[in-house]
Amino acid sequence: MPRRRLRMVAVLTVASLALHQGVALAQPAPPPARPGQLPQGRPGQQAPAGAAAPPPAAAPAPAGATAVTPQRIEVNDPALAPVPPAARTLASWNEARAIIEQRSVDLVVAVQEVARAEGSARRALAQALPNLDASGELSRLLAPGGADAPTRAAASLTLRQPILAPRAWYGIGTADLAVEVAKLSLEDRRRFTLVAVADAVVSIVTTERLSEVNRVGLRSALELLELTRRRERLGTGTKLDVVRAEQDVALARATLVSGDESLRRSREALGAALGLKGEVGVPQEFSLNGIATELGSQCTQTRTDQRADVRAARAELELAERGLTDAKLAFAPYAEVSSTLGAETYFGGTAPVGGVGGVGDAGDATRSGWSWSIRAVLTVPIWDGGARYGDLRINRAAVEQQRARLGAVERSAELESTQAVRSVEVAEQARAVAEQSRDLARETARLTQVAYEAGTVTSFDLVESSRRQRQAEIDLAVREFEVVKAKISALLASASCK
């Protein structure tokens, strides 16, 4: 009985020292980050979860008590080395914006779509403008009786001008509207590209922070494993404790491998969004808040119904309606006037009597002449087998389809804007909850370590508390960057980026 009482007194003494002096076996727990506190090395971010921080000031030790200073266990493992940096690193968001304009596949395609629409508009305009053609001809009769036939050379110049072309005239306005649709699509594609690149940058920063947290977790698991092995060698631990610690190391190592691969994929995704090959990274001093500032200066906030994709959908509906009108104009008559100026010359052999324009006599070696004609042609379409009626049905269906798409785009834009604004508040609430959970997990792990040294808990409790602390650190890191990502998404949800 006295031995049991002495053991209980020792346990209470150790627990009291741990609670009042903040004693930890592996390392002192860093103080919880204050809401809105900026991190070290990542401007505009929360403090890195799991990063080493100065230990909290210890409370004054009771009179006669001896301060306990924990010793850090040195461990070495190749996996603790950080991921090698990317082959290319962005210096700033302005550099990313310049690369987007030059190399982004989506933007290049959208720019060329504008060029194609402008080319189609020029072709539509040409249908209503004068058309001037020149032609030449050289002929000789070879047989029969070709021995005395002269060689004929002729040239003509023909000018055509439509004087009644309602379909061609209407097509000019339709082509100009198609150019406007292409420009709106380019504006919307630029907004999507900026969102994709910004998300990729935030994802890289997030996965880099998780990679750091995972390495801190692996180091902690390795230190715990080494401590458990020492206890086993001293006879105060069991083989089961060692196996549990080894399982914890294996789990931490698997999380580290998965996190490093996520980091590489995030770098590759940024490179793909920028139109570059391989991995593209961001420096440690890259400011995520700077992204929001730059986007705020480059993009203009508008109402949801004035967003580029909504305006493009309205223009496409108008374009479909003009297509229906164009199909109706196919029933209209068409008239044009043309004038031809021609000249021809016969040389060699025996030229025909009268020649061209009645100049010259039969038998001359060379005869020449010219002519000028003017004519007007009126074409009235009557029956083409029903093709125009088929065009009418096609274009009526296209109008109804585009009207339905416009409604869907308007609803989607409104919903996206509402959810983007709400996601900022949700992300901030989730970050606050994750921070509280992280603090509780830290304190639980610290008390579990103290209790394990006192022999009141098993190695299973120690390993489990350590695992939960690592998971809480990871969750907090993810939630911190989700706040930044949500703010960027909310900024671009109803923006116009030209």
Image (cartoon, rainbow, N blue to C red):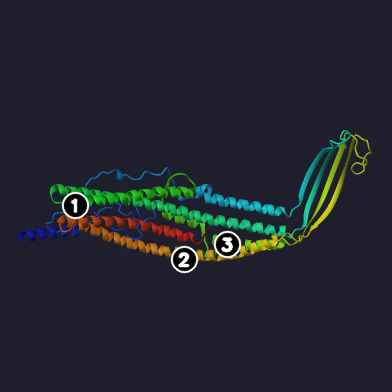
Element under disc 3: helix
The residue where tag 1 is placed is 240
Q: Which residue is painted at 78% across and 44% down in the image? A: 134
Which is closer to the viewer, label 1 or label 2?
1
When the figure is inspected, residue 434 is found, relative to residue 253, above or below; the finding is below
Which is closer to the viewer, label 1 or label 3?
1
How far apart marks 1 and 2 lie (CA) works out to: 54 Å
Residue 41 seen by the camera: no
The residue where tag 3 is placed is 313
Identify which amino acid the numbered label 1 is placed on.
Leu
Q: Which residue is painted at 80% across and 58% down in the image? A: 378
Do labels 2 and 3 touch, CB within 8 Å? no
User: Label 2 neighbourhood size at 10 Å, few (<14), some (14-19), many (20+)?
Assistant: some
Instruction: Identify the residue at the far front of this view.
Output: 144
The residue where tag 2 is placed is 418
The N terminus lies in quadrant: bottom left
The C terminus lies in quadrant: bottom right
Element under disc 2: helix
